[in-house]
């Protein structure tokens, strides 16, 4: 019993330490962002790596997310012969919730994990110390371009993902439910509002910010060699996923 | 001038540096020697402000490095060139960009001036042909030379060299020490050189400090060191000569 309490206490302390360190790191990034000196080359490099290289995986995820949303609602649509609301049901659930959430999780697994691995490798091979020794602030040079790229690209990818999800939804409802694409589109265009779309975009931007801060923090806070890099990537992916769900809950609650 | 006053560094309950004090007058070169784990690399990192001491003070010229925040440390670091033991080269850019890196980031020079400086430095370290190579394609000796070129491309008045010839063959070792001497002479730089190459250090340095388990065991002129009765120093020098 006392062992369990001790473990629980240790876990709580570790969680508080991580949250505290993350808050301090966020403050440092925010302070650096007030006087931004972005390296143009590094920023373009990150925008390409984070955005363009993620496009295929995000497009595939979104396409199937749209299809899944239709498959899930299909039985009830057929049962109630509610073909004229299938576009609205799809748009409401995918644009507001499923789209940004799935794209966020994919983005975290691909971009966030990669980012943590890269920064932690730079840390253990003393490249970050070399930057500091050369009078270059790692927050300005490494972190700011990453945060900017991830927020911008996560938002852009979510918008592009919406388009792919729409294609997936229309195709599936036509093939599976026999709903004419025009009926689907009319229902979608009539009932899905700009607010639904903006809701998803706001979530995507928030997820991008969270993934960038979490992945950069765990990358730069790494201790130890290869083992430390592995642990950092693992912690980063878990923390990013948790922060995505926590943010999703609060944003949904605020924008309801 | 570099000065350490009673510097103590404790990590996980272990005293890695214990009341370390010494100074290096402007223009002089100090050989920092000692067994592995004696705290030599830590001293260099303290001087550069990369780590903080638990007590004691570190000065670089008039600046108390140990009391400066990260923003004000930047100005001090621009006067320092640091050669890392494990190279610490940037793996996301090629050799030429590694050397140009600090100059490009600082933005004080035009692109043409930066190119000229990089070209000159790479030719001094005999790496002109490797300009477009990635650092992963280089041998250990080449990496050390790139590291030296990057650390000195801005002609720093202070040089910190952490084992600049570790793991290198004798010919490359001699070449690197000759290069260090040349670069120091060009800028009348103050230097701390950590190395186990006793003979090369004798040629290159004015003074020697021996660290033993984080404490200064010997501090004196290089010319006196060979005749010193200090057991640790004698052992170090005799082993070095025998090698």
Image (cartoon, grey):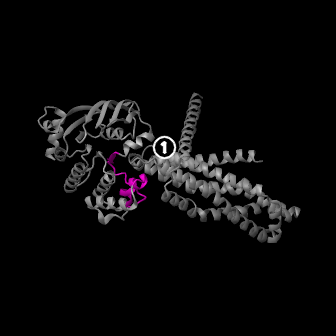
Residue B140, x across and y down, in percent = 30, 56
The boundaries of the magenta stretch are B79-108
Task: Name the one closer to the observer, B171 or A172.
Answer: B171
Q: Is residue B146 visible?
A: yes
In the picture shown, does residue B80 fall above or below A63? above
Q: Is residue A64 magenta?
A: no
Q: Is residue A106 visible?
A: no
Q: Residue, x 50% and y 51% (percent of image)?
A: A37
Q: Is residue A65 left or right of residue B179?
A: right
Label tally? 1
User: Callout 1: few (<14), some (14-19), or many (20+) C-alpha neighbours within 10 Å?
Assistant: some
Q: Residue, x 86% and y 65% (percent of image)?
A: A84
Farthest-out residue, right = A80
Question: Disc 1 sits on a residue from what chain?
Answer: A
Secondary-structure class at tag 1: loop
Q: Is residue B80 magenta?
A: yes
Q: Is residue A157 left or right of residue B35?
A: right
Residue A160, x across and y down, in percent = 66, 63
Residue B54, x across and y down, in percent = 39, 30
């Amino acid at each position: 019993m006392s062992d369990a309490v001790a473990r629980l206490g240790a876990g709580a302390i570790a969680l508080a330490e991580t949250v505290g360190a993350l808050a301090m790191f966020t403050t440092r990034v925010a302070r650096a962002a007030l006087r931004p000196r972005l390296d143009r080359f590094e920023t373009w490099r990150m925008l390409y790596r984070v955005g363009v290289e993620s496009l295929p995986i995000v497009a595939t995820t979104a396409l199937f997310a749209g299809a899944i949303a239709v498959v899930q609602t299909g039985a009830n649509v057929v049962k109630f012969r509610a073909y004229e609301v299938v576009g609205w049901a799809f748009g409401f659930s995918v644009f507001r919730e499923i789209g940004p959430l799935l794209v966020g999780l994919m983005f975290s697994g691909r971009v966030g994990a990669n980012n943590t691995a890269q920064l932690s490798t730079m840390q253990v091979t003393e490249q970050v110390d070399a930057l500091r020794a050369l009078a270059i602030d790692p927050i300005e040079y490494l972190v700011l371009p990453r945060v900017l790229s991830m927020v911008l690209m996560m938002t852009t990818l979510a918008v592009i993902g919406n388009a792919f999800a729409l294609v997936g939804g229309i195709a599936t409802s036509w093939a599976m439910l026999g709903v004419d694409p025009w009926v689907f589109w009319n229902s979608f265009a009539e009932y899905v509002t700009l607010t639904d779309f903006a809701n998803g975009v706001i979530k995507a931007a928030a997820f991008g910010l969270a993934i960038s801060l979490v992945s950069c923090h765990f990358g730069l806070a790494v201790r130890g060699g290869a083992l430390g890099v592995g642990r950092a990537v693992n912690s980063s992916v878990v923390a990013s996923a948790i922060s995505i769900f926590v943010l999703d809950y609060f944003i949904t609650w605020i924008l309801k | 001038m570099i000065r350490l006053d009673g510097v103590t560094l404790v990590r996980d309950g272990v005293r890695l540096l214990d009341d370390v004090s010494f100074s290096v007058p402007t223009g002089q070169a100090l050989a920092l020697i000692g067994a592995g784990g004696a705290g030599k690399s830590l001293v260099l990192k303290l001087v550069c402000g990369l780590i903080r001491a638990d007590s004691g003070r570190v000065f670089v010229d008039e600046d108390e490095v140990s009391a400066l925040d990260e923003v004000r440390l930047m100005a001090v670091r621009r006067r320092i060139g640091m050669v890392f033991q494990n190279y610490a080269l940037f793996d996301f850019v090629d050799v030429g960009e590694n050397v140009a890196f600090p100059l490009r980031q600082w933005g004080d020079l035009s692109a043409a001036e930066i190119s000229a400086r990089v070209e000159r430095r790479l030719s001094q370290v005999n790496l002109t042909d490797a300009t477009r190579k990635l650092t992963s394609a280089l041998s250990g000796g080449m990496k050390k030379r790139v590291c030296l070129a990057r650390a000195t491309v801005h002609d720093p008045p202070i040089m910190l060299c952490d084992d600049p010839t570790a793991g290198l063959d004798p010919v490359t070792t001699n070449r690197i020490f000759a290069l260090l001497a040349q670069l120091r002479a060009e800028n009348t730089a103050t230097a701390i050189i950590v190395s186990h190459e006793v003979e090369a250090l004798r040629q290159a340095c004015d003074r020697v400090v021996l660290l033993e388990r984080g404490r200064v065991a010997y501090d004196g002129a290089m010319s006196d060191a060979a005749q010193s009765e200090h057991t640790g120093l004698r052992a170090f020098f005799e082993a070095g000569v025998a090698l």
